[in-house]
Image (cartoon, grey):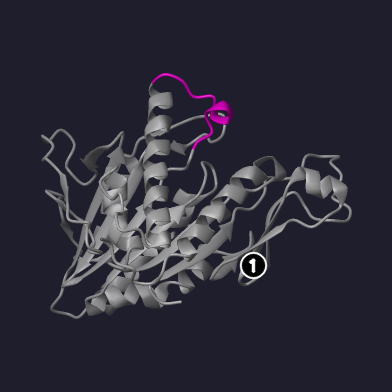
């Protein structure tokens, strides 16, 4: 499929408690990859009854044993087109604790999509074109520059454009020249260390913001977005500041869902200004870029409802007509 593709990745389950019984018959509660383009989600009720789960068709599915290198292989050629002047977007979506940030940034042993994309762009960019990096955080509807030196007064940041199918731009963002891969990776590590995170009952390192990484190569641009997860407050147990963060995250993701539904229906009006996230993402979903959405699925039957809602959102995204354009 051209224009917009959806990729799923299942997070490996936690070790089974000692003495726990293995499932017999039917399906295993939770999400699992059936084949390269099908994911099944089985509820605890279905598993206990020995019946099949619900199957979802997507463009590419990766099981719990797949490495991030394998996932990157499915978007490598897409990433390289940014060196040829194309607008490209890669977006990680899923509930809290589903492995989005690990998929995007990885570890020393298993590098994520963002550092792999940096290496790919440096290797494919024409010699006369330098790769430039920006990294921003959208926290409680406020944009912060993650590459600004600590202690330095923050420059005002503003989202421009995002209507008519075009990719939005963020004015005032600091750009780090990619003189080498070491330079880019150091900047990414520094920026990620400033991201707002907190421990909740659902996730010990829960992201409290959306992070937007932009690589520019000549006229081309690669935008990589690590979305904070839709949070079930009763499950996460947050309160105070973290509750307000969760409410802001949920509102922004709801506004993104409204954009998806309007594009899917071919509505005459698309609500791109309902949140800054919707405005930043609108071009990626509405034909302004070649886009891959990586949906990350949580492990275990206790979160099968979250896996189900994530894949239902992915289905809505897949129904957006290619290059639909925003009106």
Considering every residue shown, the one lying at the far right of the view is 24
85 with respect to 284 (left or right) = left
Q: Is residue 66 above or below residue 236?
A: below
Q: Is residue 204 above or below residue 92?
A: above
* Residue depicted at x 86% and y 40%: 19
Q: Residue at x 17, y 80 (%)?
A: 127
Percent from the top left, x then y, of residue 38? 64, 67
- Quarter containing the C terminus: bottom left
Is residue 185 visible in the rendered image? The answer is: no
The answer to whether residue 265 is magenta is no
Q: Nearer the viewer, residue 232 or 54?
A: 54
Q: Determine the main secondary structure of the stretch shown in magenta.
A: loop
* x, y percent for residue 161: 17, 56
Question: Can residue 34 be spotted in the picture?
Answer: yes
Left or right: 17 in relation to 290 = right
Highlighted magenta segment, given as a residue range: 231-240
Q: Position of residue 108 (x, y in %)?
A: 45, 56
The answer to whether residue 130 is above or below residue 92 is below
The residue lying furthest to the top in this view is 240
Rate crowding at label 1 as few (under 14), some (14 to 19) or many (20 or more) other CA atoms within 10 Å: some
Q: Kindly state the secondary structure of the residue where label 1 is placed.
A: strand
Question: In the image shown, does 246 or 325 lie closer to the viewer?
Answer: 325
Q: Residue at x 42, y 61 (%)?
A: 264
Left or right: 48, with 128 as reference point: right
For disc 1, the marked residue is 38
Residue 173 sits above or below residue 302 on the image: below
Q: Position of residue 130 (x, y in %)?
A: 16, 70
Q: Nearer the viewer, residue 219 or 56?
A: 56
Q: Is residue 232 magenta?
A: yes
């Amino acid at each position: 499929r051209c224009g917009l593709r959806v990729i799923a990745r299942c997070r490996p389950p936690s070790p089974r408690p000692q003495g726990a019984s293995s499932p017999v018959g039917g399906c295993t509660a939770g999400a699992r990859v059936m084949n390269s383009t099908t994911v099944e989600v089985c509820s605890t009720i279905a598993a206990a009854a020995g019946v099949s789960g619900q199957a979802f068709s997507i463009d590419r599915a990766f099981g719990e044993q797949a490495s991030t290198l394998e996932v990157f292989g499915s978007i490598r050629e897409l990433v390289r087109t940014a060196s040829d002047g194309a607008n490209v977007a890669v977006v990680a979506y899923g509930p809290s604790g589903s492995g989005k940030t690990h998929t995007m940034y990885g570890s020393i042993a298993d590098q994520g999509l963002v550092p792999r994309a940096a290496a790919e762009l440096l290797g494919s960019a024409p010699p006369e074109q330098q790769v430039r990096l920006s990294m921003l955080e959208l926290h409680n509807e406020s944009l912060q520059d993650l590459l600004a030196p600590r202690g330095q007064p923050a420059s005002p940041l503003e989202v421009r454009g995002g209507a008519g199918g075009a990719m939005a731009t963020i004015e005032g963002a600091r750009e780090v020249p990619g003189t080498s891969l070491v330079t880019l990776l150091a900047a990414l590590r520094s920026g990620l260390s400033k991201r707002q995170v907190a421990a909740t009952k659902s996730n010990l390192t829960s992201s409290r913001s959306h992070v937007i990484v932009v690589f520019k190569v000549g006229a081309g641009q690669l935008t990589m977005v690590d979305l904070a997860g839709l949070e079930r407050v009763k499950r996460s147990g947050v309160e105070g500041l973290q509750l307000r963060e969760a409410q802001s995250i949920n509102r922004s993701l709801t506004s993104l869902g409204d954009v998806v539904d309007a594009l899917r229906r071919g509505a005459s009006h698309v609500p791109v200004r309902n949140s800054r996230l919707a405005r930043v993402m609108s071009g990626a979903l509405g034909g302004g870029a070649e886009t891959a959405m990586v949906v990350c699925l949580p492990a275990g039957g206790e979160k099968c409802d979250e896996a189900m809602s994530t894949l239902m959102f992915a289905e809505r995204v897949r129904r957006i007509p290619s290059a639909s354009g925003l009106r």
